[in-house]
Amino acid sequence: MENKTIINKAIKFIQNNPQANLSLQSIADNAGFSLTYFDAIFRQHTGYSPVEYSRVYKLTRSALELRKSEKSVLDIALDFGYASPESYTRAFKGLYSMTPSKYREKYSEKTITWHDLSGKIAINCFRREFPELKLADVDMALDYCFTHNPFKYFEDIIGMTVAESEILTLGDTDTLEHFIYVSDYGSEMPAVDLVCDNEADAILYLKLLSKNKAPVFTIHKSIECEWEEFDAEIEKLGLIGRYGFDMIYPHSEVKVPEYDGMSVRELCAEDMTLIKEFKQRGGCSECHVKAIQIHFDGKANEGMRPVGLFSNGEILCLAMPSLDQVRELRKYDIGAIFTIETIEKDKSDKAVELVWKYVIDMCLKDNAAIGNANASDVSTDPLGVKTSERMGLVKIAKNCGYSK
């Protein structure tokens, strides 16, 4: 039996038993697989252990009850297998950062958003163009991503939480099995991202969006996912897919190499002079220097952990990993790795490898997954697919951006 089939069977079993306090053994027995190996492959596919997934799924379904029903917190706690409202409240607050009562109160009144004040310029234009789309809430969209595949959808999770977005669906707003989220970055055209696991449903959105003279949208598809009808429709509409790969490092340790004459460490504010010299020698752009300066000033980019590789007192290689955290999932995005183009190739390759592995080890010790969003297969890119795979990252999603 293929791993994906085993995982899907286990997920279905968990989702069919949200009231039960499932053990790892019971989930593995139902999937028909050995305990140790099953736990490892489940974690690689979902980002959770089976028991963690069961807990998160129960809490996301209970959140739906809080939003949509008038049941008491006690009844909902009992419905989902909690012995008391106190234990349910502790678990719920750990995931949603508020009590069930506060969460329900949040949805009892209409809140004024930035879009309400700004006029939702780009998003309102988009919604007028596509009145078939119904508005859904962002917590349901996040629930979908977390309970389907948080690794595959992590860029979508971040997109929905860092930008002003609206969730729109052609389906049922109460179950939300597929949707697009439309984000307004202050530009004339909004960013449109499709979240869907089913090819037939995805084609419905594709046909809808094709009403626009120049549809532009992005979709994350699993690497093993072959959507022949979808791809044929893309070609028929004359769309061009500009794609990259989302890659995740799933293991628990990495050996950091040692090279004579090279040292690597996290950077601090006192290193800004060296960082600026690195930029002047062609290592990176001014925007990267500014981003690091802002981080050191404490004004933004709180999750960034800049890393530098030194040789003879100069920075030869610079990394800018940044932590994204939503609910309980933590992931460092490598973001960028830069080297001085004039150094010899052998030294450059060693510098990139050393920085990569140092950053991976650093982030894993911080109890976070590590990813390389939109890795390119262009051979000259130090963050490309070949380099990423050599460092142990695995491709989890093909990120396609379609436009005419």
Image: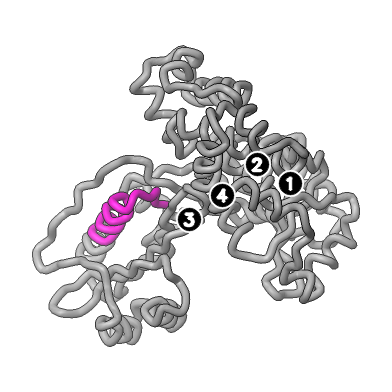
Residue in the picture at 39% in, 48% down: 369
The answer to whether residue 32 is left or right of residue 215 is left
Tag count in the figure? Answer: 4
Give the mark nearer the N terminus: 1 vs 4: 4
Residue 179's tag is: 1
Query: Which residue is drawn at the image coordinates 37% and 29% (left, top)?
Result: 40
- SS under mark 2: helix
Looking at the image, which residue sits at the far left? 260
Return the disc, 4 or 3, that comes first in the chain's sequence.
4
Helix, strand or loop at label 1? It is strand
For the residues bearing labels 1 and 3, Cβ distance under 8 angstroms: no
Q: Which residue is mark 4?
A: 96
Give the amino acid at mark 4. Answer: Tyr
Span of residues in magenta? 354-371
3 vs 2, front mark: 2
Q: Secondary structure at mark 3?
A: strand
Spatial CA span between label 4 and label 3: 12 Å
Position of 105 relative to 171 (above/below): below
Tag 1: amino acid: Phe
How much space separates mark 3 and mark 2, taking CA atoms?
Answer: 20 Å
Please state the horizontal and vertical placement of residue 203, each as a whole percent of the image.
77, 41
Between disc 2 and disc 4, whose residue precedes? 2
User: Which mark, by number, is residue 39?
Assistant: none
Which colour assignment does the render follow? one colour
Residue 97 visible? The answer is yes
How many neighbours does mark 1 have within 10 angstroms: few (below 14), some (14-19), or many (20 or more)? many
Mark 4 Cα-neighbour bin, 10 Å: few <14, some 14–19, many ≥20:
some
Q: Is residue 403 left or right of residue 126?
A: left
Residue matched to label 2: 63
For the residues marked 2 and 1, what is the alpha-carbon distance in whole angstroms? Answer: 19 Å
Kindly identify which numbered label has been placed on residue 325: 3
**x and y, in percent, of residue 356 in the image:** 30, 57
